[in-house]
Every structure is written in C-alpha cells, then in structure tokens.
Amino acid sequence: MAESLEGKVAVVTGAGSGIGRAIAEALRDAGARVVVNGRSEKKLATYAPGDDLVTVAADIALPDTAENLLATAKDKFGGCDIFVNNAGLFASGGIDEIDIDAMCAMVRVNVEAAFRAAYVFARHLRAQGTGHLITTSSILGTKVRPIASAYAGTKYAVEAMTEGLRMELADTDVKVSCFQPGLVMTDLHNHMDVHPKEASGMDTPLTPKDVAECVMFMLTSPPNVFIPRMMIVPKETAI
Ligand SMILES: NC(=O)c1ccc[n+]([C@@H]2O[C@H](COP(=O)([O-])OP(=O)(O)OC[C@H]3O[C@@H](n4cnc5c(N)ncnc54)[C@H](OP(=O)(O)O)[C@@H]3O)[C@@H](O)[C@H]2O)c1
C-alpha cells in the first residue's frame, strides 16, 4: 500500500518554477508541509499561502543556504522527512559558442550546491534513521550529447553522489534516490536561441506535472519497496 505523506515535512530546492514547483504542489496536495526554495522572491510569492508552506528565497550555491533550509523546516514544522534536491541550471553550446562563465556557474549550482545540500540533509536523515533524499538528475546523467557535455557532467556527478550515499545509508531506513527526466517544458531552456523542443522536433515533451506524478510514486512507495532511480521520458524519445 502507498505510504501516506500526511503531516510529513519536505524541503524542495528550485521550487520557484518547473519540476520543483510541481513536486512541491503535489507534496502539499498529499498533506505534507513544505519548505520551498528558489532565488526569485517574486516566483515564490505566487504560491497559495497556508500554514503548510514556508518560502525561503535564497541562492542554494551560498554556503549557508542548505543548513538554513533544514533549520527552517525544524523550526517551523518540527523536522524534515523528505529532501528534494532539485535546483539546477542548463548551459550548453559548442566549443566556440558556450559561455564559459555560465557553464561554471551551472557547475556550482548543479554540482557544488547539490552535493553540499545532499550531505547536509543526509546527516540529518541518518541521525533520524528514516526519510528520503531525492535528487533531480537527467536523461543526460546517463548519456552524453555533443554541446551538452558540461551539463551531462553535472548530472553524472549527482548520479555518483546518489549511488554513494545510497550505499552508505543502505543499512538504515533512509532512501536515497534520483530521477532522470527527458525533455520537460519548463523555464530551463528559455535563454536558448533554439529551444530543444524545436531542435528535437518533439511534439509532446513532458510537463512538470508528469514528472511530479512519477516522483510522488517514488516518494509514496511502501517502506519495503525502493526505487533507486527512475528514468522519465516523453514516449517519443528514441532510447
Ligand atoms: N526541463 C528539463 O527538460 C529537465 C530535464 C532533466 C532534468 N532537469 C532538471 O530539473 C531541475 C529543475 O529544472 P526545471 O526544468 O524545472 O527548470 P526551471 O523551471 O528553470 O526550475 C529551476 C529552478 O531552480 C532554481 N534555481 C536555479 N539556480 C538556483 C540557485 N542558485 N539557488 C536556488 N534556486 C535556484 C530556479 O529558481 P529561480 O528561478 O528563482 O532562480 C528555478 O526555480 C534541474 O535540476 C534541471 O537540471 C530538467
């Protein structure tokens, strides 16, 4: 039987828009209390207010943010059961085109900040003995494509991190997992001259809600059932 998330406490990074937002809304709908993080206060202000939600506008790449998110969850809701390690950026381009500064900024968020946050929450969950740490990887965490080597590298890194933490916590009731979306229609690619939907000729990419439904399946699996990783792609993806 699916586990109830009623009363559980979750922290979701990168929840101002897109996948993180859809997961935060789904957690809320399932009765969880949620701390949502993003950089833009304006985006976070569009959540419906309620006793079950706290917004924290902060750059996850700053050294204190993950600790502050955990402290907020403990202070406002008495603990933290689920950490959705989702904030991310996308910088791509060929050797001559890629903006190297943007690429390095992406590495700081997708790798450094994701690792820092994962370890902060892993320590908390291990001490608690239960919980779920789930990280947003990508289909590019399993396959490198030309012009996206740096992004793929960041997602390969979180795949390795997830696997290592999973093995370290295997003898506890803490679940450590990740999911690997294919193309999802979010703000992630808005800065690109040619959107990947156009470039790929794909008709029906995923929606954030499609992904959130799959993630909720992972988060509500019974205690004896564990899905270490889930790939979620548009049906028309040739994989
Ligand atoms: N869309 C896809 O096709 C796809 C596919 C595979 C994996 N993913 C992954 O899914 C995750 C979510 O992306 P998305 O597609 O939902 O894009 P999105 O709508 O642009 O969401 C990304 C979120 O991350 C936040 N963020 C970025 N840098 C941050 C920072 N330094 N500190 C705090 N928050 C930060 C953004 O907040 P602000 O706007 O407030 O900065 C935004 O809310 C990323 O890890 C991405 O790599 C996406």
Image (cartoon, rainbow, N blue to C red):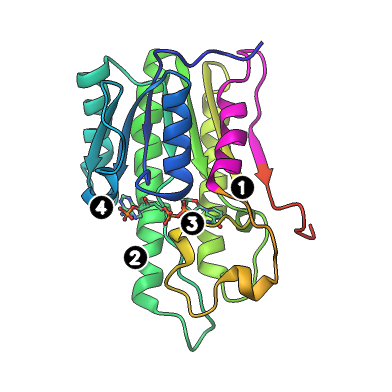
Residue 214 image point, x, y percent: 62, 35
Frontmost residue, 89 versus 216: 216
* Residue at the disc numbered 2: 105
Q: Identify which residue is drawn at 34% across, 47% down.
A: 16
How busy is the neighbourhood of tag 3: few (under 14 within 10 Å), some, or many (20 plus)? Answer: few
Q: What residue type is labelled 1?
A: Gln
Residues marked 2 and 3 touching at CB (< 8 Å): no
Residue 62 visible within the image: no
Q: Which amino acid does label 4 sit on?
A: Ser
Residues marked 4 and 1 touching at CB (< 8 Å): no
Instruction: Answer with mark 2 or mark 1, whichever residue precedes in sequence.
Output: 2
Badge 3 marks a residue whose secondary structure is: loop
Instruction: Answer with mark 4 or mark 1, whichever residue precedes in sequence.
Output: 4
* Residue at the disc numbered 1: 180
Frontmost residue, 111 versus 217: 217
Badge 4 marks a residue whose secondary structure is: loop
Badge 1 marks a residue whose secondary structure is: strand
Q: Does the residue labelled 3 lie within 8 Å of ligand 1?
A: yes
